[in-house]
Image (cartoon, rainbow, N blue to C red):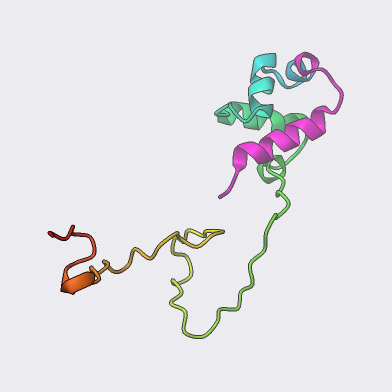
Amino acid sequence: MVHLRQRLARFIREKRGKTPQRVFARKIGVAQSTIMRIENEDQNVTLDTLESLCQVYHADIADLFPPLEISRQYSPRVPAGLNVPEQGSHVTLHDQAPAHDTSKPRKARPGKNGAAANKPSKK
């Protein structure tokens, strides 16, 4: 995931430092509430706001979105026999294995007298 809001919020917080939001907002020509929402990752930022930030800080658009630290790195090596999707396809990673295998339906095991275990026996 790209996390652009988080990356822009980080840029704003670093540039603002200890300057009050109201003063910082006035410097770049936006409302204080806009700065607050950007820092809280709630603002859908306009191109005009991004251009203002670039002009004030003499920065390229890419500079407004500094990379985040990577919390987890995965080995590019894949054990033999694994079915791995082609590069560029969407993959969902899970930290835990599913509670049960959903790939095959379960068969009913016979209980006493050959009856299915999930059916009550008649006596």
Q: Is residue 3 magenta?
A: yes
Segment colored magenta: 1-23
Q: Is residue 61 left or right of residue 94?
A: right
Residue 39 found in image quarter: top right
Residue 120 found in image quarter: bottom left
Position in image of residue 56 (x %, y %): 76, 29
Q: Majority secondary structure of the magenta segment?
A: helix
Q: Is residue 12 magenta?
A: yes
Q: In this view, does 47 lie to the left or right of 90?
A: right
Position in image of residue 66 (x %, y %): 72, 46
Residue extending furthest toward the left: 122
Q: Is residue 101 above or below residue 15?
A: below
Residue extending furthest toward the bottom: 80
Q: Which residue is drawn at 52% across and 58% down?
A: 94
Q: In this view, does 123 lie above or below 9?
A: below
Q: Is residue 102 left or right of residue 67?
A: left
Residue 102 found in image quarter: bottom left
Q: Is residue 13 left or right of residue 115?
A: right
Q: As rendered, which of 71 and 55 lies closer to the eye?
A: 71
Q: Residue at x 18, y 59 (%)?
A: 119
Residue extending furthest toward the right: 18
Q: Which residue is drawn at 48% across and 70% down?
A: 87
Q: As rendered, which of 78 and 34 lies closer to the eye?
A: 78
Q: As rendered, which of 7 and 95 lies closer to the eye?
A: 95
